[in-house]
Image (cartoon, rainbow, N blue to C red):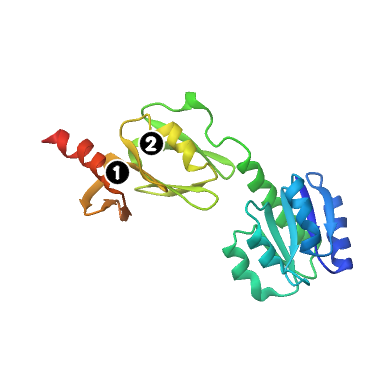
Amino acid sequence: MKCIIIDDEPLAREGIEKYVAKIDFLENVGAFENALSAQNSIQTESVDLMFLDISMPYLTGIDFLKSLKNPPLVIFQTAYPNFALEGYQLDIIDYLVKPITFERFHKAVSKAYDYWQLKNKPQFIDSQSINNDFIFIKCDKRYEKVMLAEILYVEAMQNYSMVYTAHQKLMTLQPLKSFEESLLPISQFMRVQKSFIVNLNKIESIMGNEIKVGNKMITVGRPQKEEIFNRLVSKKS
């Protein structure tokens, strides 16, 4: 993983650089004293992970992260623990409070590495693993067998998807588009809006512009509602 370090404290930068040098899956491609000086590197280099201080001159780490359209994975490093909640709302990997021990650093980067691997590997085994009965979904470090008949719906989240069944919910970094490619050829599944693929057999009711699947009310557009109605109601008439 290629990483950069952004911190206005020289000793803090040096400390993280020394820690990075001890981790064989990390490659330090730059260390910067403020966010402005790091902007060009973020835009031109392939960066997988960013160690980012929060309180810096000119531009805070939080504001810098918010300004990035496609940010890399981020680990905040700061002397101020009170920004943790806001940090996690920005989907950071971890939040390190200075002084940072190597043990705590190693735990954070290991989490980032696992996430990065999951993100960059196919989540489904291959198309041959998909038949009319089940699908394999990669969740964390395991492949989970899920019976198609048990899937209620798949929801796209910010950086991942959630697969809901009647008994469990599974998180995977597979984007919804991949589920589209795998599930939509199967007649029982339909993408009903930008963020949802549903199992038509699990729709319990259609009310106005909403459908009920399990305990979830999902808003659908008029074209999708008409298609659902045609596929579920009209054909039964």
Say what amino acid the circle numbered 1 marks: Gln
Q: Position of residue 72 (x, y in %)?
A: 68, 51
Q: CA distance from mark 2 to mark 1?
A: 25 Å
Q: Which mark is residue 92?
A: none
Q: Residue furthest top?
A: 128
Looking at numbered disc 2 in the image, what kind of residue is underneath it? Met
Residue for point 26% across, 53% down: 209
- Determine whether, in the image, residue 144 is placed left or right of residue 12: left
Residue 46 in the image: state x and y as whole percent.
74, 44
Q: Is residue 39 left or right of residue 161?
A: right
Label 2 neighbourhood size at 10 Å, few (<14), some (14-19), many (20+)?
A: some
- Of mark 2 and mark 1, the one earlier in the sequence is 2
Q: Is residue 106 left or right of residue 196?
A: right
* Label 2: which secondary element: strand
For label 1, the residue is 224
Q: Residues within 10 Å of mark 1 (few under 14, many from 20)?
A: some
Q: In percent of the image, x 63 and y 51: which residue is there? A: 70
**Residue that appears at 22% across and 50% down:** 206
Q: Which residue is mark 2?
A: 147
Query: Measured from the top left, where is residue 128 in percent x and y?
Result: 48, 23
Vertically, is 155 above or below 5? above
Give the vertical position of 106 relative to 227 (above or below): below
Residue nearest the viewer, comparing 159 with 172: 159
Which residue is at the front of the view, 57 or 134? 57
Q: Is residue 135 visible?
A: no
In which quadrant of the rendered image does the N terminus lie?
A: top right
